[in-house]
Every structure is written in structure tokens, then in C-alpha cells.
Image (tube, rainbow, N blue to C red):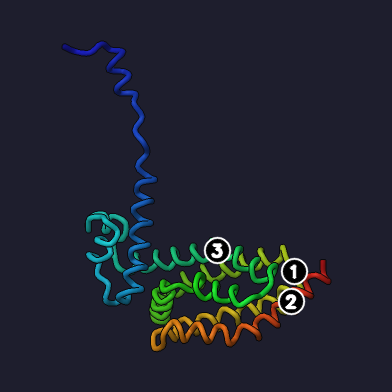
Amino acid sequence: MRSPAGGRGRRLGVRHPPRQPRSEDTRARLLDAAIECFSEQGVAATSTASIARRAGVTRGAYLHHFGSREDLVAAAVAHLMERSMAGIEATIRRLFTTPPTDEVFLAVWRDVYPDSYFAGYEMMLLARHEPRLRRLWQRHSRLLARRRRDVLLTLFPAALVDEQVTPFLEGFADLFRGVKLMEVVRSRAESRRVVLAMAPLLAARIEALQALRRTAV
């Protein structure tokens, strides 16, 4: 027996959830899986099948989002930089508004430079010979630097940001990048000792910048 017109109208009028959020979720899972695989296996040794398996999706779903390996690596770069962007304000505020204790520096080493940093470093090296990837790194690096400056300007005068705080943070980041990279050939316990050995020098400079901040307010 055919349903009345009103019933049919109600069925036809049912609104299904939009598919876009599900598609974005799948893409994010694929990128998280790719970065994990890159960190564990290396970029060159990671297969599309292993990424799809780690993400819990089919190879067809992978290919729907990333038509080539170059597309995947480019998207993974953007994904990593977005992660960095999300945490930059909390890190800067912790460095310059709280006492610079050993635990602060250990937290930077542990949280800002996790094992996924190895994946980022490998992808950065690929950019030396791939213009498209190099342009992407440069673009996201500029965005990150702009975001960092915006946060710093809420704490310090512009002249101090440009002449002292930003150069210090560049050196600070280079130090921790180097410590992380050396974990390829040494243990985390050794890296921890290096961080703690450098902590008094870093703390002294941060305390000096905090003092300048107080006098400038």
C-alpha cells in the first residue's frame, strides 16, 4: 500500500548530515597517520598502503584525497606547520611570563619537539630539490613567524621584539632542533642531560628579557 503524499513528503524532506566533515576527518586521519609512519619508517620507506592501514581507511580513500606522493608530502608539511601554529602562543607565554625552570626547558624539548619532528626534518630536506615543496615550507615559515611576532607584541615593545626577543627565539629553536636531531645517534637520557646543562644559560637570558619586559610595561 502506497504511503500518503504527506508521508512521502516527510521522507523526501529528511536532511542527511553533510559529508564534508567526514571527508575532512578522513583527510586529517590520513595526515596524522602519514606523519607517524614518516617518523617511524622514514619518508622514502613509507608506502601508501601502510598509511591507509594506520589511518583505518581503504587505499581508494587515500587516493581520493591525495592523487600523488608529492600531494601527500605537501599536505603533511602544511599539517605539521598548523600543529606548530596551534601551540606557539602557549609556548611563548610560558617562556616569558613564568620562571624559567629546568622543567620549562624539558617541556619544550618533550612537547615542542616530539618524534614527529624527524618527519618534518626529512620533508624539509626534500624541499632542497623540490621547488614546489620549498615554496610551501617558505610560505608556512613566514606565517609561523608572523604569528610568533603577533604573540610577542602582546608581551614586549616592537623594537625589543625585533632586536632581541626574536633573534633569541631563533637561536633557542635551533638549539632544540639540534638536540632532537642528535637523538638519531644518542639516547633520550643523553639529550635530557644536554638540555639541563644548557638550562642555566637559557634561564639567565630569559630572565634578562623578562626584566626588560617589566621595565617597558
Type of residue at label 3? Answer: Gly
Could you tell me if residue 198 is visible in this image? yes
Please say if 209 is above or below 147: below
Q: Viewer-proximal residue, 44 or 109?
A: 109
Q: Residue at x 78, y 75 (%)?
A: 211
Q: Viewer-proximal residue, 8 or 165?
A: 165
The residue tagged 2 is: 209
Q: Secondary structure at mark 1?
A: loop
Q: Position of residue 69 (x, y in %)?
A: 30, 68
Q: Viewer-proximal residue, 23 or 116?
A: 116
Q: CA distance from mark 3 to mark 2?
A: 21 Å
Residue 152 occupies quadrant = bottom right
Q: Secondary structure at mark 3?
A: helix
Q: Position of residue 52 (x, y in %)?
A: 26, 60
Q: Secondary structure at mark 2?
A: helix
* Crowd rating for badge 3 (residues with CA inside 10 Å; few <14, some 14–19, many 20+): few
Q: Viewer-proximal residue, 99 or 169?
A: 99
Q: CA distance from mark 1 to mark 2?
A: 9 Å
Q: Earlier in the sequence, mark 3 or mark 2?
A: 3
Could you tell me if residue 133 is visible in this image? no
Circles 3 and 1 in contact, beta carbons < 8 Å: no
Q: Earlier in the sequence, mark 1 or mark 2?
A: 1
Q: CA distance from mark 3 to mark 1?
A: 19 Å
Type of residue at label 1? Answer: Phe
- Disc number at residue 156? 1
The residue tagged 3 is: 87
Residue 33 occupies quadrant = bottom left
